[in-house]
Amino acid sequence: MVTTQNNHHFPISIIDDPTSYRSSVPPSVIGWSSSLGYSLSNSPSLSSPLNLLPNPVTIEHHIAHAFSAVAVSGMYSGIISIMDGMGDTWDMGRQEREGWEGGFTAILQDDGNGVILTPGGDSREPELPKTLTFRESESFYKFKRTKSSLGFSLTPILKRYSSTFSAFTPSHGFEYYNSLGGAYSRVSSHIFGDWNACGKVMGVYPYGKQRKGWVVRGSVTGKEGVEVNYGRMEGRPLKERVGEDEIDFVERFKGDGAMGVEGWDVDAVPNAAVRETIELCHDIQLDLNEMVIRTLEEVKGLAREMGGTENLENLVLAGGVALNSVTNGILKTHHSLYRNVYIPPFVGDEGIAFGAAVKGAIDSNGGEVGAARISEILDKFEPYTGSAYGEEEVRGSEERSDDLATPYLLTKTTRFRAFIQDAPPS
């Protein structure tokens, strides 16, 4: 039996007191975070004997993401992309990068806020600023299903670490973090007072009509680095500045008399905070769309240069950024960059425990005997993680449904693996 644990922001093996990091956090960051109600105090449950396992084996955050998504993808090979808000620290990633075959090359990006790792090189550790902590933000691997006891192989293409002020700042540094997910969460916090209200940001996006400026720009894969326009997100959160007009703002988005997207005129909104809300949501979504598509295009080019037998038309997405259905829709419907794109149902950190369980199952069934067992385990996973329904049940639902629901019922049973996989494990 494999028991897995994951915590949204804290490492399982080392439960630190975040108050010890307060001295390294600029006062402006503490003030901004405190206004949102974030607390520096640690949760007593973290040190509960029920949550502390003896001799835990830890794996990196993005590796767990990769195992969770690839295992259920139904694909034999391809590219796995993990774009996250925040992953493990540079120090915690030492075990992974030291295991890269052929070594690694570390490049500090020009803005000083990011480090790029690429395979091959002298494995020299870069000199990082002492006042900053670097954590995983975007990782890309080639994957391939194998008949060995490894289950499937992960070959690194590129990995990026982004900086924050300390290992655990107020709100754990999420909104002062130069990653794509971190920039989107900063907008969410600045508007709604909640770093995890990104779905609301995405929902407001179409009500903006014209770009008013940039929020995040630069390059994930290049030396230029990623830049976040914090100047557009200063002062009190917008939810505090909307005031009495907030009721009118909400009412316009619901009910029979709601204005549709086409009829909305953001410039006619009298409250400046409401206008700023709409413009900020609109601009961050445009920036995210552009940067994700461009990054995935560049990653595919890097993977092609590496050679190998992986099918580079297959893409699996994981990490919090893959929760953005607007960007996902553009990637899947408006671009021919990847022929097959799979997005698992647990792309966020809820998938980490599953990824750790998959890795644990593989590791605990190693050796010659284990190879067949691992193949058997992986064969049980598939993209459809819900209940199974037979043909009779589907037909019965169709007969009980009204005319509006009928077109959305699948009346022909198909197997995902039958048309997405291109080659058996080797």
Image (cartoon, helix red, strand yellow):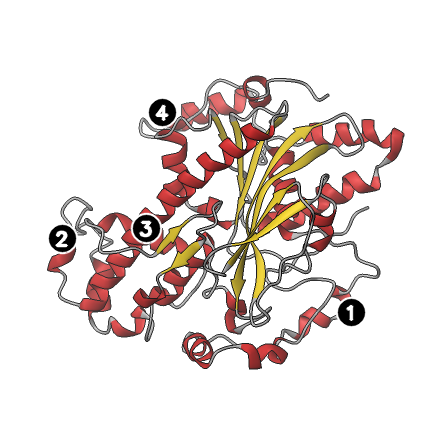
How much space separates mark 3 and mark 2, taking CA atoms? 16 Å
Q: Are marks 1 and 2 in contact (CB under 8 Å)?
A: no
Residue holding disc 1: 49
Left or right: where 406 falls relative to 108: left
Left or right: where 119 falls relative to 203: right
Sequence order check, earlier mark of 3 and 2: 3
The x, y position of residue 62, in whole percent, is: 61, 48
The x, y position of residue 126, in whole percent, is: 63, 58
**Element assignment for label 3:** helix
Q: Quadrant of residue 192?
A: bottom left
Q: Is residue 339 above or below residue 355?
A: above
**Element assignment for label 2:** loop
Residue holding disc 3: 203
Are there few (<14), some (14-19), or many (20+) residues within 10 Å of tag 1? few
Q: Quadrant of residue 45?
A: bottom right
Are there few (<14), some (14-19), or many (20+) residues within 10 Å of tag 3? some
Q: Is residue 242 above or below residue 115?
A: below
| Residue at 66% from the left image edge and 50% from the top image edge | 353
Residue holding disc 4: 407
